[in-house]
Image (cartoon, rainbow, N blue to C red):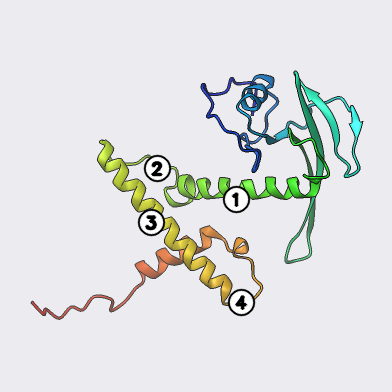
């Protein structure tokens, strides 16, 4: 997140796990201090050009540092993705967390946890863009908006259920490998091209 001020007040919590995850990139000293003051722990991503002082190097490759007045731990992570055609992409990012104990919270575990966070972002994107194509809800009153939201959530859940079932048909396949856009387009095509679904014979 940029230097924007955090919403006020932040919810109080005494939980240290899982850590709170701020939006995409954040370097805001005020945000970090405000979240830490609630008793929550933080795991987020720093901007690539953000330089933090190295105070102590730790055994897992991370290091202790400080942002503002808050003691933090910085993790430099590298990701390698191998596509089905053999193409390889490599990228890196820098994580920061208030979980400074590397023995209890290894860098690899926190990097994996941050990856899981983006699955939530993918769900939000599917609702905002893939299903609605960015369209603003049509309803002009709260009851109508609520009805539309429930309809979108029902459609989303139904598609995700079908995706999981499709993945389970091939043992060992992670449902995360299924493409939501393909699932939506396939469902739409089946509805549009459906034949003999409704009988034309009048029974009433």
Quickly name the residue at label 2.
135
Q: Label 3, label 2: how many angstroms apart (C-alpha)? A: 18 Å
> Residue 81 has which mark?
none
Please report whichever mark, 1 or 4, sits nearer to the chain's N-terminal start. Answer: 1
Which of discs 3 and 2 lies nearer the camera? The answer is: 3
Please report whichever mark, 3 or 2, sits nearer to the chain's N-terminal start. Answer: 2
Q: Label 1, label 2: how many angstroms apart (C-alpha)? A: 22 Å
Disc 1 and disc 2 in contact, CB within 8 angstroms? no
Quickly name the residue at label 4.
170
Q: What residue is shown at x 26% (from left), y 42% (from top)?
A: 144
Q: Secondary structure at mark 2?
A: loop
Q: What residue is shown at x 67% (from left), y 34% (from top)?
A: 41
Q: Label 4, label 2: how many angstroms apart (C-alpha)? A: 35 Å
Hey, which residue is sitting farthest front in the picture?
14
Q: Label 3, label 4: how many angstroms apart (C-alpha)? A: 25 Å
In the image, residue 8 lies at what x, y percent?
A: 52, 21
Q: Label 1, label 3: how many angstroms apart (C-alpha)? A: 18 Å
Please report whichever mark, 3 or 4, sits nearer to the chain's N-terminal start. Answer: 3
Placement of 57 over or under 124, stated as above or below: above
Please report whichever mark, 1 or 3, sits nearer to the chain's N-terminal start. Answer: 1
Toward the viewer: 10 or 157?
A: 10
Q: What residue is shown at x 68% (from left), y 29% (from top)?
A: 26
Quickly name the residue at label 1.
119
């Amino acid at each position: 997140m940029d230097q924007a001020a955090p919403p006020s007040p932040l919810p109080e919590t005494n939980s240290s796990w899982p850590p709170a995850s701020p939006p995409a990139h954040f370097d805001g000293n005020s945000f970090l201090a405000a979240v830490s003051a609630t008793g929550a722990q933080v795991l987020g991503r720093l901007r690539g050009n953000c330089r933090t002082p190295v105070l102590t190097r730790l055994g897992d490759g991370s290091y202790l540092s400080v942002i503002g007045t808050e003691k933090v731990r910085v993790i430099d992570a590298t990701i390698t993705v191998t596509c089905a055609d053999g193409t390889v992409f490599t990228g890196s990012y820098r994580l920061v967390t208030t979980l400074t104990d590397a023995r209890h919270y290894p860098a690899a575990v926190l990097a994996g946890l941050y990856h899981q966070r983006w699955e939530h972002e993918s769900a939000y994107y599917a609702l905002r863009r893939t299903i609605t194509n960015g369209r603003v809800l049509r309803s002009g009153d709260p009851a109508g908006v609520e009805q539309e939201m429930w309809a979108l959530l029902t459609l989303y859940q139904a598609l995700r259920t079908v995706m999981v079932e499709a993945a389970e048909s091939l043992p060992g396949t992670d449902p995360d490998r299924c493409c939501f856009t393909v699932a939506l387009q396939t469902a739409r095509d089946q509805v549009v091209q459906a034949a003999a679904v409704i009988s034309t014979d009048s029974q009433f």
